[in-house]
Amino acid sequence: MVKHRGRLRGQTPSNVLKSGTIELPAGSIPSPSGGRSSAVDFTHALLHGHPAAVAAVDKVMGDPKDEASLADEFIASTYTMGKALHLSGRVLKDFDLVMMRYRDDMRKAHRFVLDDEFTRFASELSSKCTAEKLLTRLEFATLPYETTWIEFDLWTKLRVMRTHHGLDPEGFNKDDTSQKMGMLVHRINETDALCEIVNRWGNGIVGPNLLAYLFSTREREWGETRYFGSMPMSVIAHKAMTAEGFEAANQLGISIDEQRRLGKLGTRLGGSMWGFTEKGQSTFIRDVSELSKIKTPEFLLRHGDAAFSRMYYALDDSLRRAGYEAETIDETVQIELAEFTGMMRWLVIVLAMLNEVPTRSDYVQPSHQMKAGLTKRIRAVDYHRLTLRLPKVKPVPYLERKISGVEHHRKAHEVRAHWRTYLHDEQ
């Protein structure tokens, strides 16, 4: 147990000094002093933005973290993530440029937070969804904004999924599972989009995953383009198996060794985005060894692809330049593919519900600020909290009809689907 007693300047109306005892479990922060000085260890961790040290200070100071959305925590972490990963010099500077782009995307995004009931119903429909039904629902999964943020309670989703697959709903490790999850979705064009997943890592950092997903309402080839810095896995896998692919890879700035490594990974694991068995039924993956159960139906193959995210390239480049082994990053990608199997099936259901099912929107503008590092404070971002407006009798069949196309009116001419405009009450 590491204890540190000190007086901390708090953000109170009178700006008075506050004091308290900070307690940290042994081994929760690095120990540059070799365990000889808890004060030195704690100061080093705080200056480098270590999540455990920052959280301990916030607890003593009474910082209103319980009011913070995951979007707030993610934006704040982009200022300190590089130092928390112990990057420095030019490596840190290059990594921070990528974090700045994430920060800009989050600030311009239209942000939505789903309430637990919305998350439960979406998870139930997703768990029951077959491959054939998903193909129908893809028609309604359009993205109306250039950048959209969707945040929800992951534990709620996991409980529903585990129940549907005959597992103990509370049988997952809450210490190793982020409670909140966010999806940063970019519109490529009228029919195509890229999704990046954001959650809390095991070390407490809130950041984007190494994995991203491309999806489309129509069949298409993704080609050799990097979409918002992310490269499709299937493209890399195809290139890795041809001599022409090696030459094309070099033109993209990817070495032959890197191409072989990523191609092997993409060939084996790129099919987890929809999360179906060979018969087109939804499946639940508990670890990497079960990924062999996944089989993408032929009619869904060209509707999407897993991708190496821009975070993958930023982290892979930074950690390799800092002396880490590349295989460590690849193992993390495999774990993510298993852990988030079927996540795109769930997102398609959510987007279809947003487009076709009546919702109530509550506009939220938090008044607090978030700490970003030792001294910097940033204003919390606003968002819309969404609640479904459902009949009290048979809500699930009602939702099934809404996103199945049964109640969808035929268009007189081709128009782009869009979400309703939210109007705020005049003050």
Image (cartoon, rainbow, N blue to C red):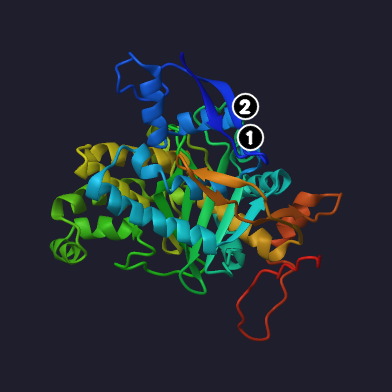
Q: Which residue is mark 2?
A: 170
Asked if 332 appears above or below 26 in the picture, the reply is: below
Q: Secondary structure at mark 1?
A: helix
Q: Are marks 1 and 2 in contact (CB under 8 Å)?
A: yes
Mark linked to residue 420: none
Question: What residue lies at 57% left-to-right and 51% top-to-bottom?
Answer: 346
Is residue 305 in sight in this rendering? Answer: no
Q: Nearer the viewer, residue 292 or 221?
A: 221
* One can see residue 137 in this view: yes
Using a 10 Å C-alpha cutoff, classify the residue at mark 1 as few (fewer than 14 neighbours), some (14 to 19) or many (20 or more). Answer: some
Res. 329 image quadrant: top left
Kindly identify the amino acid type of the residue bearing the numbered disc 1: Arg
Task: Answer above or below: position of 264 versus 37.
Answer: below
Q: Which residue is mark 1?
A: 159
28 or 21, which lies in front? 21
Q: Position of residue 67 (x, y in %)?
A: 66, 42
Label 2 SS: loop
Q: Position of residue 307 (x, y in %)?
A: 37, 55
